[in-house]
Image: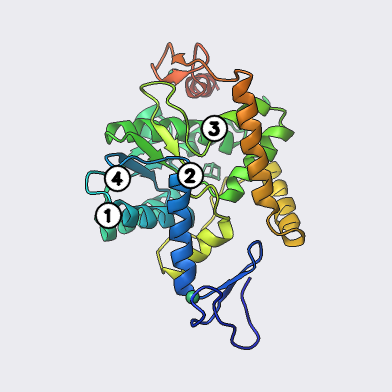
Amino acid sequence: MAVSMERVTCSICKRGEAFFFRRYSGERLCKRCFVKSIEGKVRATIAKYDMLKFNDRVAVAVSGGKDSVSLLHILAKIEEDYPKSSLVAVSVDEGIRGYRDEALKIAEENCKKLGVEHYITSFKELYGFTLDEIVAALKGKGENHLTPCAYCGVLRRKALNTVAREAKANKLATAHTLDDEVQTVLLNMLHGDVMRIAREKPFTDETHPKLIRRIKPFCEIPEKETALFAYVKKVKFQTVPCPYASEALRNDIRFFLNRMEEKHPGIKFTIFNSAEKIKLALEKIGAKENLKECSLCGEPTTQELCKACGMLQKIETA
Ligand code: SF4
Ligand code: ZN
Ligand code: ZN
């Protein structure tokens, strides 16, 4: 929330002019202290979940949007403190005409500016189809097909793991914010898929040698603040929304959570912390997955066929 009225000083440095009121903590922050607080929060999250080791090779998933570009900038700064570690960026071109091309260009520009190596893969290269082709193939087939986002999500998850492995990374950092995490918890509950809550962790377990461990250093930072960070730091990011953005239920949940947060500041953190407790409880009752390799592509999966191969088979027969 922007602070207007007369000049209000920053709660931290007591000198700068406050431009942001953090309702859940009661702090009023100047731009400098705000940036420092976000960087400090990311460092604290990394320490809390023991996400990084001094010699890690971290792949940051960069889509070109505000969250991923901000994460790249912050991790590039943190990485400077660890001479034995290294950082690369990885991107997936889903093949969405007029949308992803621009985002990738922006991702590339940010990588160049920071001197970070950038690895790109595409749906076309990995699966033989662009997302546009998948959507066209499934259109009007009369069956109860999933949304473009459902295909995109599964195929991108696998592609990110593949490209991170090619980049020889041992950690894959994604820019999921507190909002993303809390929305996903509620979404899984509303879909009746409670076991998925246990799988979406801030730092995933080591479950299979082919599965790069994922970290979410923004998991305790509200989306509003990652966006503000990008504006204040003047980082370039893509603002155009994806033409297929259609997750109706997630949008309803986002709207609901934002209203709740307005009325009850800090409620998103409460849900996040509740989900962490649920995850611990699920672990105790042995909700861990046993991974084997997909009989078609060899990637880790709980089923005979991984989700991506299952989807691709559907597309080929569509
Ligand atoms: Fe993919 Fe949906 Fe995101 Fe578009 S909005 S990039 S289709 S997940
Ligand atoms: Zn200040
Ligand atoms: Zn497979």
Question: Disc 3 beta carbon < 8 A from ligand 1?
Answer: yes
The residue type indicated by label 4 comes to: Val
Q: Secondary structure at mark 3?
A: helix
Q: Is residue 309 left or right of residue 128?
A: right
Q: Nearer the viewer, mark 1 or mark 2?
A: 2
**Which residue position is annotated with label 2?**
48
Q: Secondary structure at mark 4?
A: strand
The residue depicted at 67 percent of the width and 40 percent of the height is 274
Q: Secondary structure at mark 2?
A: helix
Is 43 or 57 nearer to us in this picture? 43
Instruction: Tell me the tag on residue 88.
Output: 4
Q: Is residue 47 left or right of residue 82?
A: right
Task: Name the spot of residue 25 as percent of width and height, x first.
Answer: 63, 63
Instruction: Answer few, some or many: residues within 10 Å of disc 3's Cα (few below 14, many 20 plus, some between 14 and 19).
Output: some
| Quadrant occupied by the C terminus | top right
Please indicate, yes or no, whether residue 68 appears anywhere in the rendered image.
Answer: no
- The CA distance from mark 4 to mark 1 is 13 Å
Task: Name the spot of residue 81 as percent of width and height, x first.
Answer: 28, 53
The residue depicted at 49 percent of the width and 81 percent of the height is 16
Task: Name the spot of residue 296 as percent of width and height, x first.
Answer: 41, 13
The answer to the question of whether label 1 and label 2 lie on touching residues, with beta carbons closer than 8 A, is no
**Which residue position is annotated with label 3?**
151
The answer to the question of whether label 2 and label 3 lie on touching residues, with beta carbons closer than 8 A, is no
Is 40 or 247 nearer to us in this picture? 40
Q: Nearer the viewer, mark 3 or mark 4?
A: 4
Task: Name the spot of residue 251 as percent of width and height, x first.
Answer: 68, 48
Q: Secondary structure at mark 1?
A: loop
**Which residue position is annotated with label 1?**
80
Q: Earlier in the sequence, mark 4 or mark 1?
A: 1
Please indicate, yes or no, whether residue 55 appears anywhere in the rendered image.
Answer: yes
- The CA distance from mark 2 to mark 4 is 23 Å
